[in-house]
Image (cartoon, rainbow, N blue to C red):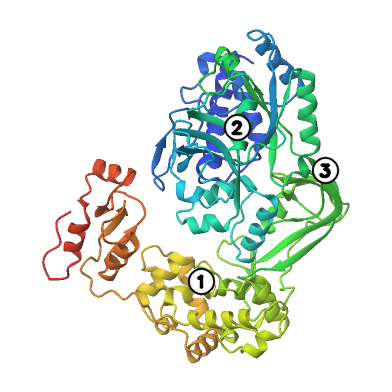
Amino acid sequence: MDEKQAKQTIDQLTELVLYHSRRYYDQDAPEIEDYEYDKLLHQLMDLEESYPQFAHADSPTKRIVGQVKNTFEPVEHKVQMGSLQDVFTPEEVYAFHERIKEVVADPVYVVEPKIDGLSVSLEYRDGIFVRGSTRGDGFVGEDVTLNLKTIQSIPKKLLEPFPFLEVRGEVYMSEERFQKLTEEQEIREEKPFKNPRNAAAGSLRQKDPAIAAQRGLDIFVFNVQQIEGKILTSHKESLDFLQQQGFPVSPSYQAFSSIEAVMGEIQRIGENRENYSFGIDGAVVKVDSFAQRERLGSTAKYPKWAIAYKYPPEQKPTVLLDIQVKVGRTGALTPTAVFEPITLAGTTVSRAVLHNQAFIDEKQIAIGDTILVRKAGDIIPEVIGVVSHAQENPVYQIPDICPACGSPVFFEGGQAAKRCQNSDCPAQLLRNLIHFASRDAMDIDGLGPSIVENLVSAGLVKSPADLYDITLEEVSVLDRIAEKSGSNLLAAIEKSKQNDLSRLLFALGIRGIGQKAAKLLAARFMDIEHLFSASEGDISSIDGFGGIMARAVVEYFSLDATRGLIDRLQKAGVNTRSKDRPTSDRLAGLSFVLTGTLPHMTRSEAGARIERLGGKVSSSVSQKTSYVVAGEEAGSKLVKAQGLGIPILDEAALLALLEDDGSPIPEK
């Protein structure tokens, strides 16, 4: 490779690795496997070493690519939360050992599994957990203390009240919990997390700690970052100490004095990775002695005294026996590959989702083909290509008739999936009911998937309206429902009648209408009856609505089945009017951002009062923001507003603005 080619390749690789880094760290939505990303990074490192004159100043080989978002307050790490250099072969492990021996004569190594999760810092003062943060770019992370406090295995109080202790750990989601979460997402027809690592990261970055608490996160702690009141001299000693203080520490950590034993442990962990209840993507090798680590030092990004051995993803060929099609909650037809069973990452798999017709066409998949299958993130089976095509078999086509009800199915408006439009389709019923009762919809406590399935199997419920007709006698005879549980369920159903219109609109499962869109519809039309006569133009004029969403709403309210359902719900006493009615348009056209803690109101209460006067509440600061309302501990949003010259209001100024006394609105 000449210099011109080297520079071009380095430029291309730098851009590619930065792109995939942002997808991984900032968006929790990777497009490639970790192993593929690590190989790209390794290739870039090798090229930069050979041609250092072409290395970019912002090269991802020199720093951790991760951004601090406005969602949480920034936290500066006094001790850098760095990453480890990846290796992929035994030869690279032995080369690492040779580099260590050039500085240290008698190294002892600790080997432990590399947990596939999100790296965090936990801080304790006088033995009390006071703050937790993400790694971010290694120097500045995000304050996620409230979400971390929902993780039961994190000790909130230590056995000994050390003046200060900061530890580093990896938040993860177990494979069992991940499977359950993806099943729930499938039922709600949400885009599932790609792997447990992204599920853990997405859960830890939820604004509402209650959501994080529901996700069943866990943690392993693997390092002491800072400590006052105790001297530690080695890594193994520090892990033993952390375990004594009540921390869950890296599982199966062991010390070895020979590199051959280290390599043997790496192989043992790799061979047994399917036995762990959580995802691992490698093994970590660290010099045990802290004094030796000081002598070895670090680069700008990596410590020289540690490496991470990465295991390649396992993939195998198999024969595609069939493609089965199921119908989702919104009528979308999803094809699933059924193939001869194979063992991947320690488990037997025989099915994998094929997504849609475009995916099948891209891979040119036909029944009878020999396909290549792997487990994405070692969890979810996926078809990655065709090894050999079956002779004379055509590329599979998703049928034009719904397999559940026989109604015609269609592609609509650039959508990737074919869809059944029959609202009475039995395949959609179970998912519709689960969504209707879910927390963000009608919030019927106790009406989970298993109970819904019982009600449907017993023939008691064939429509959401039927929920409001069931009796205690009918519920009590169902499997796993005691009389008290049945009474509680009926009370929750009765309570749901008082929900706001926005919840009902979201619960109806109108295609493309999420919580935010449902609130906008409720605010604009106030009464569900007005939606039956609303035009596509009326709806698309709402800020935040597009033509496809507006069309979906008009189509839904034009159906006779919709009219019948709403009539039954109204007859049962379900509220179909908005409770959040603007009392005036005094603040119409103004956008507010709330940050920090207000003295006498919660941010939700302040936001509701703004919206009742016609104002809009946004979560992010931009040039379009009219005012920022700042309370105590206001952080990055306040700083950004000051930089943009946006007026800042305290609670007193906001209350004065909310007084609907006819006085003029202050100039922006």
Horizontal side of residue 206 vs 629, given as left or right: right
**In the image shown, does 74 or 161 lie closer to the viewer?**
161
**In the image shown, does 494 or 58 lie closer to the viewer?**
494
Amino acid at the residue labelled 1: Ala
Q: Position of residue 600 (x, y in %)?
A: 26, 61
Neighbours of disc 1 within 10 Å: few (<14), some (14-19), many (20+)? many
Give the labeled residue for mark 3.
Answer: 316
Give the labeled residue for mark 1.
Answer: 441
Dot 3 lies on which element? strand
Figure quadrant of residue 424: bottom right
Give the labeled residue for mark 2.
Answer: 241
Q: Position of residue 340 (x, y in %)?
A: 87, 53
Going by the picture, which residue comes out furthest to the front? Answer: 160
Look at the numbered discs 3 and 2 and tell me whether their residues touch, using CB distance below 8 Å.
no
Horizontal side of residue 536 vs 185, given as left or right: left
Neighbours of disc 3 within 10 Å: few (<14), some (14-19), many (20+)? few
Q: Earlier in the sequence, mark 3 or mark 2?
A: 2
Q: Position of residue 459 (x, y in %)?
A: 70, 85
Is residue 46 visible in the rendered image? The answer is yes
Q: Earlier in the sequence, mark 2 or mark 1?
A: 2
Horizontal side of residue 482 vs 605, given as left or right: right
Q: Position of residue 616 (x, y in %)?
A: 30, 62
Amino acid at the residue labelled 2: Phe
